[in-house]
Amino acid sequence: MSDSPEHPWRPTPVPVDWLWNTLEVGGPAERVEAFRLAAAGSGVVPWVLDLAALEEEFLLPMAGPQDGVRAISLSGAKVLARRLRDAAAANHQAALARMGTDKSCSFDLHRLLPVPPGILALGPEEEESKRWLRTHWGVTRPLRHVQVLPSTLDGRKRKMGQLRVGFWSADWSPWAAIARLRRAWPELSFELRPHYPGSQQQLDEEKPTHAPEQKGRKRQAGAGAG
């Protein structure tokens, strides 16, 4: 159906179901430490953003707001959309700048299983990009709110090591990434536990951080995940 003043087209945000997961990595202490160092990164995926398309997506809902939402002038909407685009670009550049030194994300999938440059150049919203992520990571967005969890390893096992992390994943757990990591690090064990909402497992174990907000494309403009 074509657009009309009565029925203008509006972008529809894609809902996301965020799932809390815990991952335990175990094995010889020196190999666990090597994995810990390899996995630590900024959590940033350095996508090439289509800023013109992003600006348009900021503009459209302001130019044709939903019923009952006060409209602003077209010129005002254009100014605001450009400012939002510029803010997204600045945030993206700041995220890219810290990639070389920031190790605050203890389980950074892009560090372990890097997105190829050809896929990065397409941007995060292209179907080919999503297919690559589904195939290699098992999820189509970076992990969110990654945090180190207390070790459960018996302290008497001094030759053994353990890394425990918790994180939110979008819509599914990163099983594909875990399968690839098991092949790449055969000396280590990887035990991934999804905590489905309301399950007894979620109630009995560590309480997760709050889930990320439901976000559509515009909020995905940043290079990485918090």
Image (cartoon, rainbow, N blue to C red):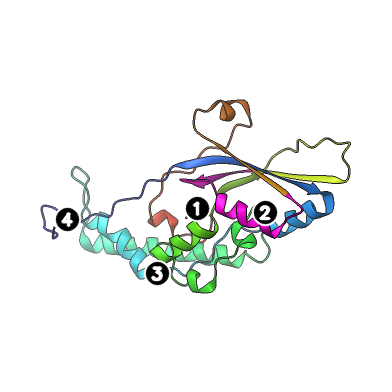
Specify the quadrant of the image occupied by residue 153.
top right
Image disc number at residue 94:
none
Q: Position of residue 191 (x, y in %)?
A: 66, 43
In terms of depth relative to the viewer, which is nearer, 15 or 64? 15
Between discs 2 and 3, the one toward the N terminus = 3
Q: Is residue 91 left or right of residue 8?
A: right
Cα–Cα span, label 1 and label 2:
17 Å
Q: Are marks 2 and 3 in contact (CB under 8 Å)?
A: no
Between discs 4 and 1, the one toward the N terminus = 4
Say few, some or many: other residues with alpha carbon within 10 Å of mark 4 (under 14 / 14 to 19 / 20 or more): some
Q: In front of the other: label 1 or label 2?
A: 2
Image disc number at residue 50:
3
Between discs 4 and 3, the one toward the N terminus = 4
The number of discs equals 4
Task: Check disc 3 and give the amino acid type.
Answer: Asp
**Which residue was labeled with disc 2?**
182
- SS label for mark 4: loop
**Which residue was labeled with disc 4?**
8
Q: Position of residue 24 (x, y in %)?
A: 69, 43
- SS label for mark 2: helix
